[in-house]
Image (tube, rainbow, N blue to C red):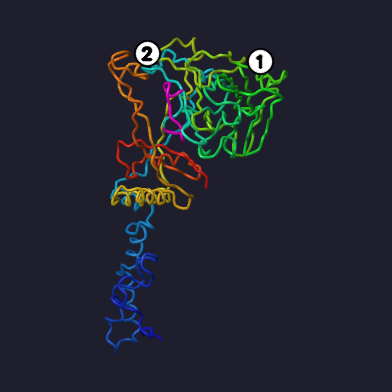
C-alpha cells in the first residue's frame, strides 16, 4: 500500500538543529522539506505520483550533504583532514611543525669526533657542551655555565649536549660538597624529573659521595665501593660506555688510583663497570650529564672536554663533547673523516601532525587567542594541549642574565677590572613549564609552535616534577 507514513515524520522547523544534543551529534537528521507536504491528500495513495515526488525529493534533499559538511568541516571537534586545515588557518597554526631530531649522516665511525673536511664549513665559533641554563631546578650558574651552585634542597641541572652511543669521558670537580651522600653525578634522559633525586627513578642513574661511594638507580643501591669517597676539592673522572651501559669513576685527587675503587675494574676491557641497564634507560637513547647538589650552597664544576682533563681518557674513550673548532675548515686528517655525523649541531625536522594532534593544537591556539596571559589561562592552554597526559603547569623562575663586558667583570670593580659589568648580581624572571609525564619529540615541537600566551622575551624552560 502506498501513501504517507503515519504519523508523518517531523518537518524542518520542528527541531531546527536536528535530533541530537547540542555539541554532541551530527548536523541533523530532519529533511529540510517533507515531500508529503506537496501531495494533495486525494492523491496520497497514487503509487505513480508518490514515486515521482519521493524520488525527486531524495535527489534534491541536501540534508546528508549538510550533515557531512558539519561533521567534516564546520565542527572542529569532529572535523578531519581538509576541515582541520581550514580551522588551522582561521586560528593561525600549521599542521607542519618543527621538532628537534637526532639525525645521523653518512660517514665513518670516527665522524663522532668530527673533522670538517674539505667540503664542509666549520662554525664561526667553537661548539662545546655546558650546563643547560634552560634545564635546571634550584641552581645558579657561573664560570661560563660550567659551575652549578645549589640554591635549595635537591638542586639539579642537565648538560646541553646529549650522547646516544660510544665511549665517553668527562670530569666533575666537587667545589663544595662534603662527603655525606649529598653530591651526585650521573646521566639521565629528559623523562627524568629534576624534582626527583638523581638515581631515584627509572630514568636516571647517579654516583653519590657516600662513604664509601654508592650508585643509585630507581631508588635501589646498585653498587657500593670497597672504600673511598669524594669530598670538597676532589676531581672525579667518569667514563661511560653508552653501548654496554656501564659506568666507571675514579677520584683523581684523593684516590685510590683505580676505577670504581677496584684493582680489576677496567673501562677498556669492560670489566667491573657499574651497570645501569634497565627498562627506563634503554641503549641508543639520548642521555645528558646530570649534576645533583642535594644541599643548598653546594657546587660542582663539569669538564666536558673543553679544558685539559686531570686524567687522560682510557684507550677508546673520547671527551663527552669534543670541542668543534670555529673559524674555518680543518683538514680531514685531524678529525679522522671527511664526513660529519651531525651530532654536534642542532637539527630540526618537519613533522606533519595527525588529526588528533592538530586538533589539540588548534584548540590550544584558539584558547590562547582569547587568553589574558595570566598563569591560570596559560595552565588551561597547557592542559588543552596535553589533554589526558597528566599534571602540567607553569611556574615562575629566576635567571641570572649576562651583559656585555670583559671577562674580569665576573668580579666587578668599576675602576679596577674593566669599565663594563656582567650584571650577574641581577636577576630576571622566567617561565618554567612543569610536567609530571615524559615529553616526546613531537611534544617539544608543539611547545615551540608559539601557542602559549607567554610574552615573547620571557625566557622559558622545562622542568619535570613528580606526579
Q: Given contact means CB atoms under 8 Å apart, are the residues at marks 1 and 2 in contact?
A: no
- Looking at the picture, tell me which residue is in the foreground, 419 or 384: 419
Element at badge 2? loop
- Magenta span: predominant SS is strand
Q: Where is residue 455 in the image (x, y as percent from the top left)?
A: 30, 40
Q: Where is residue 430 in the image (x, y as percent from the top left)?
A: 36, 37
Relative to 308, residue 360 above or below? below
- Dividing the picture into quadrants, the one containing residue 426 is top left
Judge from the rendering whether residue 276 lies leftward or rightward of residue 412; answer left or right.
right
Q: Nearer the viewer, mark 1 or mark 2?
A: 1
Depth order, front residue of 252/37: 252
What count of labels does the image hold? 2
Give me the residue at 60% from left, 31% from top.
181
Q: Name the residue under label 2.
A: 327
Q: What element carries label 1?
A: loop
Q: Is residue 120 visible?
A: yes
List x then y, in percent, for residue 297. 49, 29
The quarter in which the N terminus is drawn is bottom left
Q: Is residue 320 magenta?
A: no
Dot 1 alpha-carbon crowd within 10 angstroms: few under 14, some 14 to 19, many 20 or more: few
| Disc with the residue nearer the chain's start (1 vs 2) | 1
Q: How crowded is mark 2: few (under 14 residues within 10 Å), some or many (20 or more)?
A: few
Query: Whole-Å distance between the Cαs marked 1 and 2?
Result: 39 Å
Of the pair 202 and 429, the residue shown nearer to us: 429
- The stretch drawn in magenta includes residue 136: yes
Q: Which of 145 and 229 is in front in this view?
A: 229
Q: Give the magenta-colored segment's residue range.
A: 134-146
Vertical placement of residue 39 versus 105, above or below: below
Q: Where is residue 292 drawn, in percent x and y? A: 53, 31
- The disc at residue 257 is 1
**In the picture shown, does residue 428 fall above or below 257?**
below
Amino acid at each position: 500500500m502506498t501513501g504517507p507514513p503515519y504519523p508523518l515524520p517531523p518537518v524542518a522547523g520542528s527541531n531546527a538543529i536536528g535530533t541530537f544534543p547540542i555539541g554532541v551529534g551530527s548536523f541533523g537528521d530532519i529533511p529540510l522539506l517533507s515531500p508529503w507536504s506537496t501531495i494533495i491528500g486525494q492523491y496520497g495513495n497514487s503509487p505513480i505520483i508518490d514515486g515521482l515526488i519521493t524520488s525527486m525529493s531524495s535527489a534534491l534533499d541536501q540534508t546528508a550533504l549538510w550533515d557531512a559538511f558539519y561533521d567534516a568541516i564546520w565542527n572542529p571537534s569532529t572535523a578531519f583532514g581538509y576541515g582541520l586545515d581550514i580551522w588551522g588557518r582561521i586560528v593561525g597554526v600549521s599542521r607542519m611543525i618543527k621538532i628537534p631530531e637526532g639525525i645521523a649522516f653518512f660517514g665513518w665511525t670516527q665522524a663522532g669526533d668530527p673533522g670538517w673536511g674539505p667540503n664542509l664549513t666549520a662554525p664561526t665559533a667553537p661548539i662545546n657542551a655546558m650546563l643547560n641554563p634552560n634545564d635546571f631546578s634550584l641552581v645558579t650558574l657561573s664560570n661560563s655555565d660550567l659551575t652549578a651552585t645549589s640554591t635549595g634542597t635537591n638542586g639539579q641541572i642537565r648538560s646541553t649536549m646529549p650522547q646516544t652511543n660510544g665511549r665517553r669521558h668527562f670530569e666533575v670537580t666537587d667545589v663544595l660538597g662534603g662527603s655525606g651522600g649529598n653530591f651526585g653525578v650521573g646521566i639521565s634522559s629528559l623523562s627524568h624529573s629534576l624534582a626527583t633525586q638523581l638515581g631515584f627513578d627509572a630514568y636516571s642513574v647517579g654516583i653519590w659521595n657516600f662513604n664509601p661511594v654508592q650508585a643509585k638507580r630507581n631508588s635501589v643501591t646498585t653498587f657500593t665501593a670497597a672504600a673511598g669517597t669524594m669530598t670538597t676539592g676532589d676531581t672525579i673522572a667518569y667514563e661511560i660506555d653508552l653501548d654496554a651501559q656501564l659506568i666507571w669513576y675514579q677520584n683523581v685527587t684523593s684516590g685510590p688510583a683505580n676505577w670504581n675503587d677496584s684493582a680489576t675494574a677496567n673501562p677498556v676491557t669492560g670489566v667491573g663497570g657499574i651497570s645501569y641497564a634497565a627498562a627506563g634507560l634503554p641503549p641508543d637513547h639520548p642521555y645528558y650529564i646530570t649534576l645533583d647538589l642535594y644541599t643548598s650552597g653546594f657546587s660542582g664544576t663539569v669538564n666536558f672536554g673543553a679544558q685539559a682533563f686531570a686524567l687522560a681518557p682510557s684507550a677508546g674513550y673520547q671527551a663527552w663533547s669534543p670541542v668543534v673548532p670555529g673559524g674555518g675548515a680543518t683538514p680531514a686528517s685531524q678529525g679522522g673523516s671527511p664526513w660529519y655525523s651531525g651530532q654536534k649541531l642542532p637539527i630540526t625536522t618537519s613533522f606533519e601532525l595527525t588529526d588528533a594532534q592538530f586538533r589539540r593544537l588548534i584548540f590550544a591556539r584558539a584558547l590562547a587567542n582569547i587568553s589574558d596571559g595570566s598563569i591560570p589561562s596559560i595552565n588551561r592552554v597547557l592542559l588543552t594541549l596535553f589533554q589526558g597526559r597528566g599534571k602540567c603547569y607553569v611556574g615562575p623562575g629566576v635567571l641570572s642574565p649576562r651583559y656585555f663586558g670583559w671577562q674580569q667583570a665576573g668580579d666587578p670593580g668599576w675602576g679596577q677590572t674593566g669599565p663594563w659589568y656582567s650584571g650577574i648580581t641581577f636577576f630576571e624572571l622566567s617561565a618554567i613549564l612543569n610536567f609530571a609525564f615524559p615529553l616526546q619529540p613531537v611534544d617539544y615541537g608543539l611547545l615551540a609552535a608559539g601557542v602559549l600566551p607567554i610574552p615573547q622575551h620571557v625566557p622559558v624552560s622545562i622542568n619535570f616534577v613528580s606526579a
